[in-house]
Image (cartoon, rainbow, N blue to C red):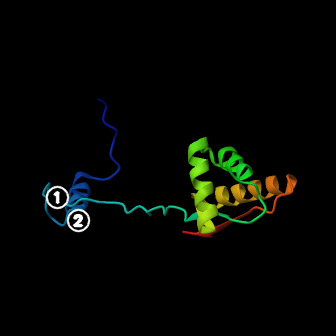
Amino acid sequence: MTRLPRLMSDKDDKRDDDDRDGGRRGNDTSVITRTRAKTQRPPLYKVLLLNDDYTPMEFVVHVLERFFGMSHAQAFDLMLTVHKKGVAVVGVFSFEVAETKVAQVMDFARRHQHPLQCTMEKE
């Protein structure tokens, strides 16, 4: 290994080393840590399906299968919950996904001339 020439004298170099470690040589045991900002998880939103007296049950099952990826049995059970209780949580998503799902369901229901209501609320 080739040493590069120093611009300071050895005496200046030694004094600088002493100043850096407080006059102690090789006894520095401090650890330098960096703090990282924690990223927060985005707030989640519940997508709710509301009951009405006009939308056919089969249509609600179809919506749950198509837009929420449920099996026929899962969709049927949730449809009965909506029918009996008046409202049910269909899924929990980030804001953008929940907003998109609500818009898709509402648009699909309107195109098929059903008054099905789908909303979202913060969890």
Q: Is residue 82 left or right of residue 33?
A: right
Q: Residue at 50% of width from left, 61% of height from top?
A: 41
Q: Is residue 16 left or right of residue 77?
A: left
Which of the two residues, 43 or 62, is positioned nearer the viewer here? 62
Q: Residues within 10 Å of mark 2 (few under 14, many from 20)?
A: few
Q: Position of residue 95 (x, y in %)?
A: 63, 62
Q: Position of residue 44 (x, y in %)?
A: 55, 63
The N terminus - image quarter: top left
Q: Earlier in the sequence, mark 1 or mark 2?
A: 2
Secondary structure found at label 2: helix
The amino acid pointed to by label 1 is Thr
Secondary structure found at label 1: loop
Q: Is residue 37 left or right of residue 33?
A: right
The amino acid pointed to by label 2 is Asp
The C terminus - image quarter: bottom right
Q: Position of residue 118 (x, y in %)?
A: 71, 63
The answer to whether the residue labelled 1 contacts the one labelled 2, judged by CB atoms less than 8 Å apart, is: no
Q: Residue at 55% of width from left, 65% of height from top?
A: 43
Which residue lies under the disc numbered 1?
29
Q: Residue at 82% of width from left, 58% of height from top?
A: 114
Q: Residue at 62% of width from left, 44% of height from top?
A: 69
Q: Residues within 10 Å of mark 1 (few under 14, many from 20)?
A: few
Q: Quadrant of residue 98?
A: bottom right
Q: Height in image: 10 above or below 49?
A: above
Which of the two residues, 52 or 107, is positioned nearer the viewer here? 52
Residue extending furthest top? 1
Q: Position of residue 66 (x, y in %)?
A: 69, 44
Q: Looking at the image, can residue 57 be seen?
A: yes
Residue 60 got which mark?
Answer: none
Which residue lies under the disc numbered 2?
19
Q: Looking at the image, can residue 47 be seen?
A: no
Query: Which numbered disc, 1 or 2, marks the residue closer to the eye?
Result: 1
